Image (tube, grey):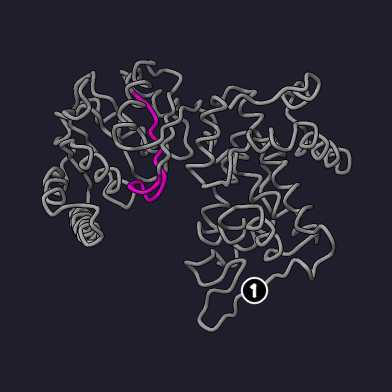
Amino acid sequence: METAKTTVGVIGAGAMGSGIAQLAAQAGHPVVLVDQSADALDRSAAQLAKVADRLIEKGKWTPEFSQSVQERIHRTTELTALESCDWIVEAIVEKLEVKQSLFQSLEAIVDPQTVLASNTSSLSLTAIAGGLKHPERFIGLHFFNPAPLMALVEIIPALQTDKRWVEAARTMMVDWGKSPVVAKDTPGFIVNRVARPFYGEALRMVEEGIADAPTIDAAMRNAGFRMGPFELMDLIGNDVNYAVSCSVFSSFYNDPRYRPSLIQKQHVDAGWYGRKSGRGYYDYNEGAGKVEVKEEALAPNTFERIQERIVAMLINEASDAAYLHIASPQDLEVAMTKGVNYPKGLLQWCNEWGVTKALAILEGLHNRYGDDRYRPSPILRDMAASNSRFEV
């Protein structure tokens, strides 16, 4: 299948769907963008025109390329316009029943060989595919927002997916200039699973009074992260982050590793969502001062203790994902550096520390709290016994 000649359908003209449509058009595909709302389609076209003007001003696009990209996208409210598409990507509301209904409707419109893909970030691909007549051509393509800028795409085959479409999707994503990784259809896939301790352990330390949010944020920036966990939760939105935490926790049958935080629930209940509401863990209202943290004013080794606890938990989560074959070690590293901009891959971090250090921190936490939240992955014990390293 010549990816440059395939017609790509995109359902949903919100920020994500519009971004995916832009990506496909940039890569030379004719695109059909469908939304129930004509106003949403108009807003999508206007936003792309603004983006194109900025890229022309910066010298990244020529006027001719800009025109060709915009002309490749056909916008319509009619689902039947997708009849001739070779690939269709859905980017609508995150509700299982709505997605199942949409794809069942699509099957009555498109060819049996048309690949149907969902951009879901949290729902089971296998469950969505379960109601289809041809589930073998269904797959997950999880883009990260904003889709035109973020390099990572998680490719998630459902249990029913024909494996040839995994490689076809990988090839197409590379052609679109993305860094694709393949993940099992498990809760959170790679990024939303492996990243949970970045938030969860930070919240736990605040609950215990070990450090406050500004200190933890400063410590993690000091470790090379672009933003601390509380800054990042405020940017994402505490309502969104808490919902993902609850979804992952429930999907893993209440595994304590993914237990949500009462502090975050209280922030959501108070309407303190973060930047978008003007208040989260920080005050974003006009006149609010910026909180400064000076390491030298803290107790000795405060930053180091915070960093080691959070990073050890992240290493454990990534190690367990490798142990359970959620993704290859190489794809796990790409996902965390390209998807959430970690300063280095977590398995590489483990190699640099030495597995015995990571294991000792986790065992110390497990012994102190007696909580399975801190149970080390078996692979870390195996590697410590054999004095081995991750191959990344």
Q: Is residue 86 left or right of residue 301?
A: left
Q: Is residue 60 left or right of residue 98?
A: left
Let me know if residue 76 appears in the view.
Answer: no
Instruction: Determine whether the residue tagged by mark 1 lies in a helix, strand or loop.
Output: loop
Foreground residue among 110 and 392: 392
- Residue sitting farthest toward the right: 368
Instruction: Name the residue type under label 1.
Output: Val
Foreground residue among 41 and 180: 180
Let me know if residue 115 appears in the view.
Answer: yes
Q: Residue 237: percent from the left, percent from the top?
A: 51, 59
Q: Residue 45: percent from the left, percent from the top?
A: 18, 55
Q: Which residue shows up at 78% across the image and 33% down it?
A: 375
Q: Which residue shows up at 35% across the image and 17% down it?
A: 136
Residue located beneath label 1 in the image: 291
Specify the quadrant that holds the C terminus.
top right
Is 143 magenta? The answer is yes
Q: Which residue shows up at 75% across the image and 33% down it?
A: 354
Is 129 magenta? The answer is no
Q: Residue 366: percent from the left, percent from the top?
A: 83, 38
Mark 1 surroundings within 10 Å by alpha-carbon count, few (fewer than 14), some (14 through 19), many (20 or more): few
Q: Which residues are magenta?
A: 138-150
Give the quarter of the image for residue 163.
Answer: top left
